[in-house]
Amino acid sequence: MEVLANVTLCHPRPSSGQDTSQAILVNSQVPRNLSANCVVVRVDRFGYSANNVTYQALGEIPHFRYFDFHAAPESEGVSPKTHGVSPVWGFGTIIASTHAAIRVGERVYGYFAATRYLVLPISPTDISKYAFFVSRPHLPADRRPYNQVTRCSSDALYDPSPEVEDLTMLYRPLFWTSFWCEDWINSSQYRGGATRVLISSASAKTAFCLAYLIRKRNATPGNTNSTMQVVGLTSKKNLDFTKRLRLYDHVLVYEDFDTTSIMNAPSQKWLYIDVAGNEALNGKIINHFTSNAKLNLVGSIALGLTNLSPSSGSPSASNWSTNDFSSHRAPSTLEQFFMPEWLAVRKKQLSVTEITQLQKDAWFALMRDCRTWNVTLCRVYGANSVKSAYDEVVRSGIPPDQGFIWSMWEDERENERARL
Ligand SMILES: NC(=O)c1ccc[n+]([C@@H]2O[C@H](COP(=O)([O-])OP(=O)(O)OC[C@H]3O[C@@H](n4cnc5c(N)ncnc54)[C@H](OP(=O)(O)O)[C@@H]3O)[C@@H](O)[C@H]2O)c1
């Protein structure tokens, strides 16, 4: 194989004592000789959202170990000891393979990195026409979903149009969390009849996809609950965006959180779903409900951590519980949604065909409906521009109206040429 020049966005590890928000671009070379059962993925484009900030912020936390999925290159004074690489969900093409069942030219989707090329060791036996799996014996078995590389040619949800690929990178990592969380809540009849659902970080995609699914369930004949209302809670700067989504019945801002103005029927049961992961906010919300005798909070669930930022440093490892991997659980008294556990229950209740059909229906509806939401796809090409875009995220957070699609390549023509 010819020598391939690589460039990777790397983050200082908190344990290195460096400023974790100072990302750097590291040049390296892809090794000429591949070991047996390895592939080289040319990473074309990837999505970037608060979810990726969470991966970085929890990169070194022993229970999550997001920095242990892809090693930082040993180059230009950087090593896996000093730096981490944050995972991203993206599309790529296999450009070299020493695995007998994986051919060069295959289009794939997976848990990749902000880099041009990724060398991945692949399990020789754990492979089907739908997917193959990266060998990561150093990580616990429950990381399996992150090791899966989806083969686009057999993926029922795949659409090769660049716009749908972009939407897929943006929504697929989040939508299934929202989808199965709503399914889980519904299995308890919304915790015994909640008719008000309050969602924090309401402008985040995970949050508004959940609102979308709640409304959708409510619009299904036979499920209609005319008293159900979904209430979003967001920051002042994202208030207009959140209202314009038209997915919430009411939108409140953090600073003046108070349900009095919308408490038009005091006997309603409330369910709180936290996507912000802000302990102070949660304290305020729980206090609001428990100190008002007219309010009835029937459940509170932790789903996200948008309030983490690369520059906020890693939270103390001892604050995190030991079985909270998939839900990015914050230390709190909130109930945790643990997707693998819930999926294991559903796999006993439903056939594979039924689950596949449920997911297909939900996904194609999302691909149709998400185009009406005011999220503009925003592509950034080139390693330097990606780094600048990342630096802007560190400075200002993630704007909800922009769906970031980043590529370490200079333009889409380079990607298209490589695909051809
Ligand atoms: N449980 C799981 O397995 C799972 C799966 C997927 C995602 N998640 C989590 O869900 C959360 C949302 O992810 P997403 O990708 O959907 O988010 P997103 O669409 O990128 O969210 C953007 C929103 O996050 C808030 N935000 C952004 N930067 C911030 C900052 N620096 N400080 C405070 N708030 C900031 C703002 O919302 P507001 O102004 O409305 O607060 C912003 O509109 C993430 O924490 C992610 O890890 C969990």
Image: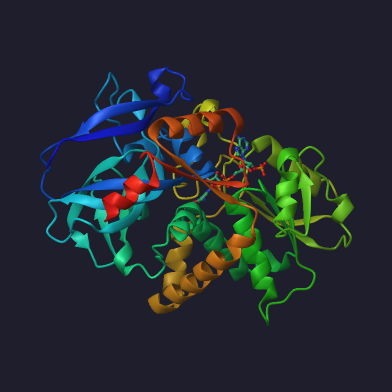
Residue 307 point in image, percent of width and height: 60, 37
Q: In percent of the image, x 61 and y 51: which residue is there?
A: 375
Q: In percent of the image, x 75 and y 74: which residue is there?
A: 225
Question: What's the coloring here?
Answer: rainbow
Residue 127 point in image, percent of width and height: 22, 62
Horizontal side of 170 relative to 151 (left or right) equals right
Q: Which of 152 and 279 is in front in this view?
A: 152
Q: Is residue 65 visible?
A: no
Q: Which residue lies furthest to the bottom in this view?
A: 222
194 to 337, vertically: above or below: below
Residue 201 point in image, percent of width and height: 66, 46
Quadrant the C terminus occupies = bottom left
Number of labelled discs? 0
Quadrant the N terminus occupies = top left
Horizontal side of 398 relative to 293 (left or right) equals left
252 to 124, vertically: above or below: above
Q: Which of 322 and 262 is in front in this view?
A: 262
Q: Is residue 269 visible?
A: yes
Q: In percent of the image, x 19 and y 55: which residue is there?
A: 104
Horizontal side of 371 relative to 237 (left or right) equals left
230 to 242, vertically: above or below: below
Q: Quadrant of ligand 1?
A: top right
Residue 130: quarter of image: bottom left
Q: In percent of the image, x 10 and y 40: which residue is there?
A: 33
74 to 253, vertically: above or below: above
Residue 144 point in image, percent of width and height: 33, 54
